[in-house]
């Protein structure tokens, strides 16, 4: 098992009211899975992703990655864990505007103190993989939205992560570009064997995955293409393959 949670909860205080962004979420993601998380606005999708990445602290519950418990990690340990195991693809691309496509892909490698020659080789390889070898020296503003997202995907893969966390990666793209990006993610999942956990509000995007979980009010209410735990209409856990 690559990633699993048990009873994961995240509660916020909003004025005098306690709001459960996540409520007793238990799920497992297998090695090489392409899992999608859907749900209406405010259902906890992005909160789940950020909590799995250690960017939000859960109120209750546990997270395991392979055989390692992630409870009690310091900020520095979480940062090292993310650098070694996770890649991120965001809706707004999050590229550094004054760096070229090549330099943006090199950025996580530089942070990880990878030698410069290896940085260049890896960035060249990844930009070619996403079909942008001819755009390596272009700044983000010189690229289309679809090309920027491809650079963001290449950057997410720079550290050879076991799991890519994608938050609405097609949210700012038109339908054709969305299909192109989803096709690229599917190919990477299939050919490279990396697991993907993608949050999306788009039914078409959700259909790109091999397993799907639906959240409402912070709870897992259904799972498709996955074994369900807790009954056919309200699954408190899901096993994603």
Image: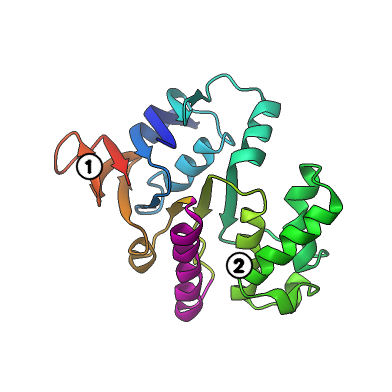
Image position of 209 (left or right of 234): right
**Gap between marks 1 and 2 measured at Cα:** 32 Å
Q: Residue reaching furthest left?
A: 232
How many marks do you count on the picture? 2
Image point 25% across, 43% down: which residue? 221
Figure check: 165 above or below 191: above
Residue 49, image x and y in percent?
A: 49, 43
Q: What x and y, as percent, mark residue 163?
A: 51, 46
Q: Which mark is residue 18?
A: none
The tag on residue 149 is 2
- Identify which residue, 87 or 203, lies in the foreground: 87
Q: Where does label 1 land, which residue?
A: 227
* 66 lies above or below 103: above
Specify start and end residues of the magenta stretch as a single range. Answer: 173-194
Mark 2 burial class by Cα count in 10 Å: few <14, some 14-19, many 20+: many
Residue 80 found in image quarter: top right
């Amino acid at each position: 098992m690559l990633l699993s949670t048990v009873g994961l909860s995240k509660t916020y205080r909003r004025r005098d009211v306690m709001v459960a962004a996540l409520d007793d979420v238990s799920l497992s993601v297998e090695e090489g899975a392409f899992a999608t998380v859907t749900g209406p606005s405010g259902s906890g999708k992005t909160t789940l992703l950020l909590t799995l990445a250690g960017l939000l602290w859960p109120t209750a519950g546990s997270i395991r990655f392979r055989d390692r418990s992630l409870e009690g990690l310091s900020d520095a340990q979480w940062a090292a864990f993310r650098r070694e195991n996770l890649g991120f693809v965001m809706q707004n691309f999050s590229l550094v505007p004054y760096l070229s496509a090549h330099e943006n892909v090199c950025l996580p490698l530089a942070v990880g103190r990878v030698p410069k020659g290896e940085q260049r080789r890896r960035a060249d390889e990844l930009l070619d993989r996403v079909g942008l070898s001819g755009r390596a020296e272009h700044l983000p503003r010189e690229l289309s939205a679809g090309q920027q997202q491809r650079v963001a995907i290449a950057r997410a893969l720079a550290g050879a992560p076991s799991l890519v966390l994608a938050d609405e990666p097609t949210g700012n793209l038109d339908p054709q570009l969305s299909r192109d990006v989803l096709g690229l993610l599917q190919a990477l999942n299939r050919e490279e064997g990396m697991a993907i956990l993608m949050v999306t509000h788009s039914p078409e995007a959700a259909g790109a995955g091999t397993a799907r979980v639906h959240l409402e009010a912070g709870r897992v209410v259904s799972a498709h293409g996955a074994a369900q735990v807790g009954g056919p209409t309200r699954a408190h856990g899901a096993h994603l393959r």
